[in-house]
Image: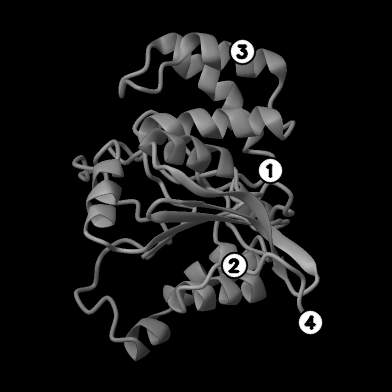
Amino acid sequence: MQIGNALLDDETDQNGMVDYAWDHAVISDRVYKNIKKKCNFSISDPPLECTAALDKYFDVYRLIDMYSIYAPTCPDSNATSRYLPKIKGIAPKIFSKFDGWRKKPAGYDPCVSYYTEAYFNRPDVQEALHANVTKIPYPWTHCSTNISFWDDAPSSILPIIRKLRAGGLRIWVYSGDADGRIPVTSTRYTLNKLGFTTKEEWTPWYHHKEVGGWTIIYDGLTFVTVRAAGHQVPTFAPKQSLQLIKHFLANQKMPSVEFS
């Protein structure tokens, strides 16, 4: 099983998002310290002081792309001004209470999600795909605006990870290290929370003659980072992603030396 830039645990995911933003010079010391002082991410209902502190955090991600912090934003002012509606009850439970917190498109073309949204709402395209045969009265979007009823998302899937590992399933977790949405910091916190024994320490892996990222092997789980990739890793690093998939399917470790 491969899991990419995955939402795994509310507490560590949210703490990691804030720590990553500070460590990558996205938010100021003042904003960072205020969040750390006012927020407890182990609870689902934050006090008003935490909400006010997090507002300053999300203000920054209205300026840059949370899904890939070094990527350009979409230059279409009509596109970038659109916000997703408030979505409640979807992990992480605190962050999901903020309007527009995941509005930014991801990918090497920052406008790609707007192109595809327009395309898949064309009547001729829907007819060709045999889609929307029930004539749903609202447009198709990447993140549905009609899922506020989803209130049963677990705060953590770590028990599932432990169960799958106990059943002998191979588990690889990979993470693009330019992703601010579920950053590598969050995933490292989460994996530490699992408490698995380390079999092979943090080491670089290579894509030909370049370092493709870093990897650590635990007892029953492998974690791989992909350099300069955002949230949807194959969009930003397709060749490295193919290498990652091939090594997983072959049950081979990522190459630790250069190759031609």
Residue denoted by label 4: 260
Q: Are marks 1 and 2 in contact (CB under 8 Å)?
A: no
Q: Which amino acid is tagged 3? A: Lys
Tell me where residue 201 appears, x and y as whole percent. 59, 47
Above or below: residue 41 compared with residue 191: above
Q: Quadrant of residue 3?
A: bottom left
The reply, left or right, for residue 84 in relation to residue 134 is right
The reply to whether residue 114 is visible in this rendering is no
Q: Quadrant of residue 53?
A: top right
Which of the two labelled residues, at mark 4 and mark 2, occupies the earlier sequence position? 2
The reply to whether residue 28 is visible in this rendering is yes
Distance from Cα at disc 3 to Cα at disc 2:
38 Å
The reply, left or right, for residue 73 in relation to residue 157 is right
Foreground tag (1 vs 3): 3
Foreground tag (1 vs 4): 4
Which residue is located at x 55 percent, y 64 percent? 113
Foreground tag (1 vs 2): 2
Distance from Cα at disc 3 to Cα at disc 4:
47 Å
Q: Which amino acid is tagged 2? A: Met
Tell me where residue 47 appears, x and y as whole percent. 38, 11
Residue denoted by label 1: 64
Q: Which amino acid is tagged 4? A: Ser
Q: Which amino acid is tagged 1? A: Ile
Question: Judging from the image, what secondary structure is the residue with disc 4 in?
Answer: loop
Which of the two labelled residues, at mark 1 and mark 4, occupies the earlier sequence position? 1
Question: Judging from the image, what secondary structure is the residue with disc 3 in?
Answer: helix
Which residue is located at x 68 percent, y 52 percent? 77
Which of the two labelled residues, at mark 3 and mark 2, occupies the earlier sequence position? 3
Residue denoted by label 2: 254
Question: Judging from the image, what secondary structure is the residue with disc 1 in?
Answer: loop
Residue denoted by label 3: 33
